[in-house]
Amino acid sequence: MLNFNQLSFWENETYLSNIDYLIIGSGIVGLTTSIELKKQFPDKKIVILERGYLPSGASTKNAGFACIGSASELLDDLSNSSQVEVWNTVELRWKGLQRLRSLLGDSFIDFQKQGSFELFRANEKDNFQNCLDHLDTLNKSLKEITGINEVYSNSKNIINVQGLIGFTEAISNAAEGQINTGFMMSALLHF
């Protein structure tokens, strides 16, 4: 770990003086913020501080899920927050992923739009039925955000095809995918 008290005069002068923007954390938020600031203010000095030698926070620990939320998650959010708040959050998730893909390119983050599945056990029949009852409403709102006609659909066949023992029902999500977070962080660091 870097000890600031041990910096030479030149290191201190080069790295830590006359800073226009200081960003704490070199994760996805810190690095994309620095990239946007540099685009807007190319002559400004931007310094990013990270607690470790590598970005080691949530940006590389989410297993690469590019998520907007499952059907039951969004229904739960809608029961606890305003519709405006929930759909604004989903839109921010979606637009954030699109901006990341546009900024770095799908190949540099190994983006794969494979979708996802929300799985339900036999004792979650009511939750599953509630999701089914609201799929049309959810899909209508999601189409406005994603442009995808049917984000969620009943996908019971995946249970048998994949041999998912212990689950009885599934809802697919066509808007989700995966990224390689290591590739993403490397691309951001070399931007």
Image (spheres, rainbow, N blue to C red):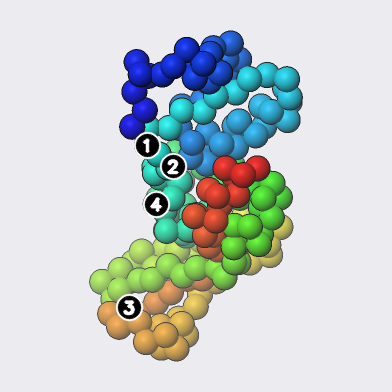
- Between circles 3 and 4, the one closer to the viewer is 4
* Marks 4,2: beta carbons within 8 A: no
Against 41, residue 115 (above or below) is below
Look at 46% across and 82% down and name the residue there. Answer: 158
Q: Quadrant of residue 113?
A: bottom right
Amino acid marked by disc 4? Lys
- Mark nearest the camera among 4 and 2 is 2
Q: Nearer the viewer, mark 1 or mark 3?
A: 1
Residue with the mark numbered 1: 52
Horizontal and vertical percent position of residue 78: 46, 46
The answer to whether 150 appears left or right of 17 in the picture is right
Q: Which class describes the residues within 10 Å of circle 3: few (<14), some (14-19), or many (20+)?
A: some
SS of the residue under disc 2 = loop
Q: Amino acid at mark 2?
A: Pro
In percent of the image, x 30 and y 68: which residue is there?
124
Q: Locate residue 48, reporting x and y percent.
A: 51, 28
Q: Nearer the viewer, residue 60 or 90?
A: 60
Question: Which amino acid, by three-letter code, is at mark 1?
Answer: Gly
Counting residues from the start of the chain, the first of labels 4 and 1 encountered is 1
Q: Which mark is residue 55?
A: 2
Q: Find out whether the residues at labels 1 and 3 contact each other: C-beta distance under 8 Å.
A: no
Please give the label number shown on residue 167: 3
The residue beneath circle 4 is 61
Front tag of 4 and 1:
1
> Which badge, 3 or 4, is on the more N-terminal residue?
4
- For the residues marked 3 and 4, what is the alpha-carbon distance in whole angstroms? 26 Å
| Mark 1 residue crowding within 10 angstroms, few (<14) / some (14–19) / many (20+) | few
Q: Earlier in the sequence, mark 4 or mark 2?
A: 2
Q: Residue 63 at x, y = what percent?
A: 42, 58
Labels 1 and 2 touching (C-beta < 8 A):
yes
